Image (tube, rainbow, N blue to C red):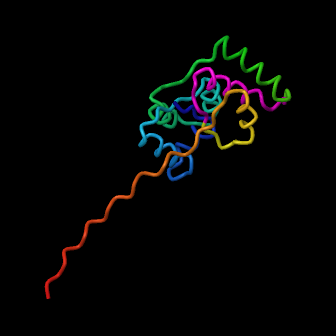
């Protein structure tokens, strides 16, 4: 399971973007995608249209992972163990949800989330590209 950070949820709606291409590769590889309720909230803060929300829900198959008491306790622990950086609170919430769900996190903000790796977070890596399709061989011409 891969939890998409907000920047990936936004990026999957931009045709041809790096995030959209990686999401396509993960889906082609059979990977399940989700977003934490925190990342989903950030996405919904928009601006987004109803059509964009519907498209993102379709890609995620409506897998929005709730944030509860266990995630809250772990997020506070991450916040305290990684320097109590004021700007990291949402990242702690997203990381805690992924850790508790044993999921990887896909994010463009790798540096912000690497702080959580020693505490159990795994960052998603791009899926291997699909094998190239063979071009049909041209029929040989007789002389």
Give coordinates of residue 91: x percent, y percent: 72, 30
Q: Which of 88 and 70 is in front in this view?
A: 70
- Majority secondary structure in the magenta region: helix
Quarter of the view holding residue 73: top right
Residue 26 spot, x, y in % from top left: 48, 41
Identify the image quadrant of the C terminus. Answer: bottom left
Q: Is 22 within the magenta? A: no
Quadrant of res 106? top right
Percent x, y of residue 19: 56, 46
In the foreground, 66 or 45:
66
**Which residue reaches farthest bottom?**
143
Q: Is residue 24 above or below residue 54?
A: below
Q: Specify whether 54 is left or right of 98.
A: left
The single residue placed furthest to the top in the displayed view is 69
Q: What stretch is highlighted in magenta?
A: 85-105
Query: Residue at 62% of width from left, 35% of height from top?
Result: 5
Q: Residue at x 51, y 53 (%)?
A: 16
Q: In this view, does 125 lie above or below 37?
A: below
Residue 93 lies in the magenta stretch: yes
């Amino acid at each position: 399971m891969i939890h998409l950070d907000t920047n990936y949820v936004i990026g999957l709606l931009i045709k041809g973007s790096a995030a959209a291409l990686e999401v396509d590769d993960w889906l082609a590889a059979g990977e399940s995608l989700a977003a934490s309720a925190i990342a989903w909230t950030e996405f919904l803060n928009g601006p987004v249209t109803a059509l964009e929300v519907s498209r993102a829900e379709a890609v995620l198959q409506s897998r929005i992972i709730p944030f509860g008491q266990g995630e809250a306790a772990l997020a506070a622990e991450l916040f305290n163990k990684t320097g109590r950086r004021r700007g990291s609170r949402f990242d702690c919430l997203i990381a805690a949800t992924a850790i508790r769900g044993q999921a990887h996190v896909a994010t463009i903000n790798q540096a912000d989330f690497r702080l959580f790796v020693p505490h159990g977070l795994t960052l998603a890596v791009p899926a291997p590209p699909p094998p190239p399709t063979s071009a049909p061989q041209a029929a040989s011409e007789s002389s």
